[in-house]
Image: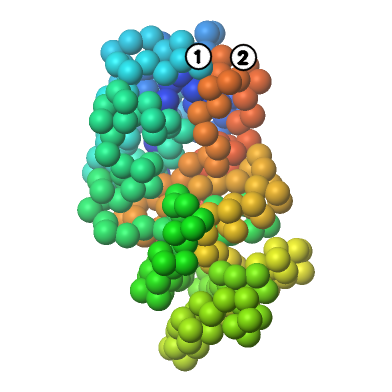
Amino acid sequence: MSETVLLTCGDPAGIGPEIAAKAWAAGERFVWIGDPRHLPDGTDWREVAEGEAPGDGAMAVLRHDFAAPAPPGQPVAANAAGVVAVIERAVRLVQAGLGGAVCTAPINKKALKDGASFAFPGHTEFLAHLAGVDRVVMMLACPGLRVVPVTIHIPLSEVPAALTEALLEETIRITEAGLIRDFGIAAPRIAVAGLNPHAGEGGTMGREEERMIRPLLARMKAEGMDVTGPWPADTMFHASARAGYDVAICAYHDQALIPIKTIDFAGGVNVTLGLPFVRTSPDHGTAYDIAGRGIADPSSLIAALRMARDMVAARAR
């Protein structure tokens, strides 16, 4: 079974190829899947076969030819199908034991929809589809914090209706299992944020906490799970509060992402929990506006590659 991290190229018109080359130059080792024409000029690369270890020296490239060149900052519709195919190939290789983990460089959902009729909201849902899994969980992680949004890319006005007992319970259970399997935490400490200001303050600022969240957590705690809350979100993320839990379960997107991006904007990692294989990604987008200028920061990608390796090692123990 290979332990190699397979790094997908992402949208080649974005910063993905640049930060991949920078990560390799910084000492990270992986196999990059993509079209070598899209790498920055002067990148030293060598072609490898499926299942081959990356080695040292020139950057290891599993060649996947695209339909067209990729001008920086200008997504090309003809390349959209190639972006999708690279993701599919990486998953196939990991499932066949020819890779240990998938690390995905950023994609642009609109570019994929326009160029390849991409039918998924993003990487996470597409990977779940490829893996044949009904539900996965998106976790954002950095050394000081792990957060999981229960609802993700929906309008804030739709969150109260979407935040059901079944969805919250499933999210907590997938998260607990992921922390045990992928992070080696034997008994994860899970803190759950309230939906409303001050976690509803006894029902005076919203009833979701008293009606649904608190009874659910009491039931799960009675099963032996180390779960607490609902906590007021405005007091959950200072340093001493973070020391009391391993992951924060948040009601909606910004409740989760604002604190982690404030604490570690450049080093956050997107992790998909609940897949049969390890998947990580840098916590940023394609950054078309700076693509090709040589100024992209590879820190989040480097963190994602390292976390992927650590997760593979945790699963092997």
**Callout 1, which amino acid?**
Pro
Measuring from the top left, give residue 2's x and y in whole percent: 35, 43
With 203 as the anchor, is 314 left or right in this view?
left
> What residue is at 70 percent from the left and 66 percent from the top?
234
Give the secondary structure at mark 1: loop
Q: Viewed as shown, does residue 53 lie left or right of 39?
A: left
Q: Position of residue 61 (x, y in %)?
A: 39, 22
**Residue at the image point whose x is 31% and y is 30% from the top:** 113
Query: Residue placed at 37% from the left, 16% from the top?
Result: 76
Q: What element carries label 2?
A: loop
Relative placement, left or right, of 296 versus 107 is right
- The residue tagged 1 is 72
Residue 293 shows which numbered tag?
2
Q: Kindly identify which numbered label has been placed on residue 312.
A: none
Q: Whole-percent x and y of residue 87?
A: 32, 35
Q: Is residue 198 visible?
A: yes
Name the residue nearer the viewer: 33 or 124: 124
Q: Which of 81 and 42 lies nearest the eye of the viewer?
A: 81
Coloring scheme used? rainbow
- Which residue is more in the foreground, 169 or 52? 169
Which quadrant holds the C terminus? bottom left
Up/down of 61 relative to 242, above or below: above
> As displayed, is residue 60 above or below residue 205?
above
Residue extending furthest toward the bottom: 222
Name the amino acid, label 2: Arg
Q: What residue do we see at 58% from left, 42% from top?
A: 303
Q: Do the residues labelled 2 and 1 touch (CB within 8 Å)?
A: yes
